[in-house]
Amino acid sequence: MHRAHRVLLLAAVCWLFAAEVRTNIVINGVQTSKQSYFFGAKDAADILCFSKTLLKGSIMPQDVTYTNPTADKNINFITLAADKYSPYGFTADIASGKIGTTTVTLKLNGKSILPYAIEIKYYCVK
């Protein structure tokens, strides 16, 4: 095999390997290693009014909505945290509603099959 052919073959193998690495890093359009989020500010008097765990193996993306049935008990603070470290993080955004109201929907995205659990907690006015 000529030297030029070997160089070309080596370059092709390197390019394919790099494409595989890029594919593993960008999953569902998410490129982050972030493992936790919070929205709002927790007052000392706020109480846990709703929690949900997205289990390991869950399909992403997912929406998580909570509406407080008590009209005057607004959601003040929300936390999200992975139960273990992974190089594949997740993203979380408020998709609808807002902090300080009775309804908030979160949009979570990450690796197609979640490699860890995510604990989501909503805190409301007491």
Image (cartoon, grey):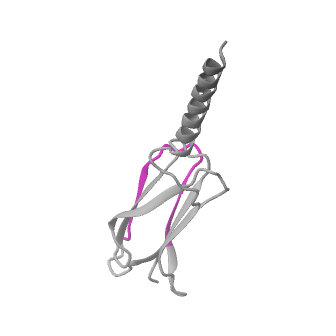
Q: Is residue 16 magenta?
A: no
Look at the image and tell me whether residue 79 can be seen: no
> Residue 72: where, in percent of width, then height?
34, 81
Quarter of the picture holding the N terminus = top right
> Residue 46: where, in percent of width, then height?
50, 82
Give the answer, above or below, for where 83 lies relative to 55. below
> Residue 71: where, in percent of width, then height?
32, 77
Q: Residue furthest bottom?
A: 44
Number of numbered labels in the structure image: 0
Residue found 59% across the figure and 39% down from its top: 21
> Residue 32: where, in percent of width, then height?
54, 55
* Viewer-nearest residue: 53 or 98: 98
Q: Is residue 55 magenta?
A: yes
Range of residues picked out in magenta = 49-68
Give the answer, above or below, for where 41 lies relative to 17. below
* Viewer-nearest residue: 75 or 82: 82
Look at the image and tell me whether residue 38 can be seen: yes
Residue 13 occupies quadrant: top right
Q: Main secondary structure of the magenta part?
A: strand
Residue found 49% across the figure and 43% down from its top: 59
Q: Residue furthest top?
A: 1
Give the answer, above or below, for where 15 lies relative to 63. above
Residue found 57% across the figure and 64% down from its top: 36
Q: Residue furthest front?
A: 3
* Viewer-nearest residue: 100 or 38: 38
